Image (cartoon, rainbow, N blue to C red):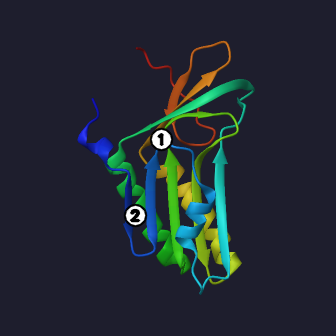
Amino acid sequence: MASQDDDVWELFSQDCYAALTRDHLDVQALMDRVRNPAAGAIVLFAGTTRDNFAGKPVRELTYTAYNKLALRTMLAIAKEVSKKHGLKGIAMVHRLGTVPIGEESILIAVSSPHRQSAWLAGEEALEECKSRVEVWKREEFEGEEGVWRANRDGATGEKAES
């Protein structure tokens, strides 16, 4: 049974947008959310499931989140990054559930009057998301049991007992 928190899938405030979904991610829709006539640049980051981690073949990733809190954190990050870099728009969406090899698990789009601030803002938003957002992933490896871990680059997981 889904909890009440699972019913919350998006939050927005002015030109900042945060969402979680179980569906495939739509690059064009996210870019359109940040499109602005005063923006000379839109930068898009697409994080995809790769086929390996630390030399092990990865079969797929599965993401889970505490939706309500994850969305609040994502929106707070969006607001912070937008203010710091003078953005015209910022949108972030993270996919939950199983994400096969080659498919996107996160999209971040930012628009800015100039490209340099857009590049910097996009990278900062991604790093803050990976560091702070309440999303966890399970890496399923070929031929061995999967591992749950925080959604951070390079952090190895701990085997969770069922």
Mark 2 vs 1, N-terminal side: 1
Q: Residue at x 64, y 73 (%)?
A: 118
Give the CA distance from mark 2 to mark 1. Answer: 22 Å
Circle 2: residue type: Ala
Instruction: Count neighbours of disc 1 (C-alpha within 10 A) and say few if under 14, some if 14 to 19, many if 20 or more.
Output: some
**Farthest-out residue, left:** 4
Give the residue number, with chain letter if any, for mark 2.
Answer: 76
The percent position of residue 13, horizontal first and vertical second, equals 37, 71
Quarter of the image that includes the C terminus: top left
Query: Can you say whether 81 is above or below 88 in the image?
Result: above
Q: Quadrant of residue 51?
A: top right
Q: Is residue 116 left or right of residue 20?
A: right
Q: Is residue 1 left or right of residue 22?
A: left
Label 2 or label 1, whichever lies nearer to me, is 1
Q: Nearer the viewer, residue 155 or 88?
A: 88
Q: Secondary structure at mark 1?
A: loop
Residue at 70%, 36% (x, y): give it. Answer: 50
Residue at the spot of label 1 = 22
Q: Which amino acid, by three-letter code, is at mark 1?
A: Arg
